[in-house]
Amino acid sequence: MKSKSLIISLIHDDLINTKLVYSLNNLGLQAGDYTLHISGTVLKLSKIKTTPLRWEQIHDEYLRMTTRVLQIDIQESPRLVYTLAEEIYAFLQRRGKEERIRAGNSCAPQCLLRDNSAYQP
């Protein structure tokens, strides 16, 4: 499986898990412990090199985007979940490109830019 398709597949799985956990919570169950935390893995695989603060901001944006799955009826429109996964992947690609440009315009190589692929949120 190529990197792109693997990442999109993981995002799709994260969206399904998000929908499930939120739905169970809405039924009165405390399902927060069933969150798979796939977002960290997705961001690691995206290899976005940036500062820890910017990485957290990108992660928060990712999480906000995943909540859009709550508006999708997965039974009626399963393709929309995959479309949202592709949109989130494109967002991560744009952020990665922006961070590479930002790094190229930075004051010096020692400006604390690093690969956050091992960073745990």
Image (spheres, grey):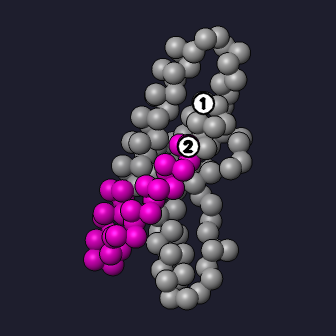
Q: Residue 84 carries which label?
A: none
Please report whichever mark, 2 or 1, sits nearer to the chain's N-terminal start: 1
The residue pinned by badge 2 equals: 57
First to last magenta residue range: 57-84
Q: Residue shown at 30%/64% (left/top)? A: 79
Residue 121: x and y, percent?
Answer: 68, 50
Instruction: Determine the main secondary structure of the stretch shown in magenta.
Output: helix
Q: Which residue is drawn at 55% across and 88% down?
A: 28
Comparing labels 2 and 1, the label whose residue is closer to the camera: 2
Q: Is mark 1 on a helix, strand or loop?
A: strand
Q: Quadrant of residue 53?
A: top right
Count the marks: how many? 2
Give above or below for 85 relative to 3: below
Mark 1 surroundings within 10 Å by alpha-carbon count, few (fewer than 14), some (14 through 19), many (20 or more): many
Where residue 38 sits: x, y (%)? 59, 58
Residue 74 placement, left or right of 99: left
Q: Is mark 2 on a helix, strand or loop?
A: helix
Report whether 75 appears left or right of 105. Answer: left
Q: Residue furthest top?
A: 108
User: Dot 2, how many residues are within 10 Å of its Cα: few (below 14), some (14-19), or many (20+)?
Assistant: few
> Which residue sits at x=60%, y=39%?
55
Residue at image point 61% right, 69% down: 35
- 81 part of magenta stretch: yes
Q: What residue type is labelled 1?
A: Lys
Vertical placement of 12 versus 77: above or below?
above
In the picture shown, does residue 113 fall above or below 95? above
Label 2 is placed on what type of residue? Gln
- Say whether residue 45 is visible: no
Q: Where is residue 102 in the image (x, y as percent from the top left)?
A: 51, 21
Which image quadrant is residue 93 in?
top left
Q: Name the residue under label 1.
A: 49
